[in-house]
Image: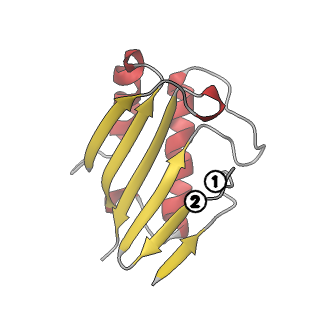
Amino acid sequence: MKQIISTDKAPGAIGPYSQAVKAGDFLFCSGQIAIDPSTGALVEGDVAAQTRQVMENLRAVLNAAGMDFSHVVKTTIYLSSMDHFSTVNAIYGSYFPSEPPARATVAVATLPKNVDVEIEVIAYGG
């Protein structure tokens, strides 16, 4: 059985998808970009500011499912350029001070709303 997870503390879906879906003990979080949920606008600033907002959006979705970053087992980071890797990596890493999840990082041609970073996570709550 699956359960749709939704919170107003993270940006609403801008297409036919859910913020997250819980299936058994797993939580599959859709990719988050740097939208401020209180305004619905993109966060102004560089890739560091974008990454912090993305991670806070993910935190809100995880929390809505009764989880936190310690439950994350896999992430995928999408970057507009690998030139952003070290900046994103440093901020991302601060959210996983021990036992970080498995991860893939890829550069893509473009991301929604022309942002520089999007991150999706899979968490396990069993």
Instruction: Specify the farthest residue to the right.
Output: 39
Residue 78 lies, in percent from the top left, at 43, 34
Instruction: Specify the farthest residue to the top.
Output: 83
Residue 121 lies, in percent from the top left, at 40, 53
Residue depicted at x 70% and y 60%: 8
Q: Residues within 10 Å of mark 1 (few under 14, many from 20)?
A: many
> Helix, strand, or loop for circle 1?
loop
> Three-letter amino acid code at disc 2?
Gln
Residue depicted at x 54% and y 45%: 32
Residue depicted at x 69% and y 55%: 12
Horizontally, is 109 left or right of 46 in the view? left
Say which quadrant the N terminus sits in. Answer: bottom left
Horizontally, is 10 left or right of 47 in the view? right
Residue 88 lies, in percent from the top left, at 41, 28
Q: Identify the residue position indicated by label 1 in the image.
A: 10
Name the quadrant containing residue 106.
top left
Say which quadrant the C terminus sits in. Answer: bottom left
In the picture, the disc for residue 19 is 2
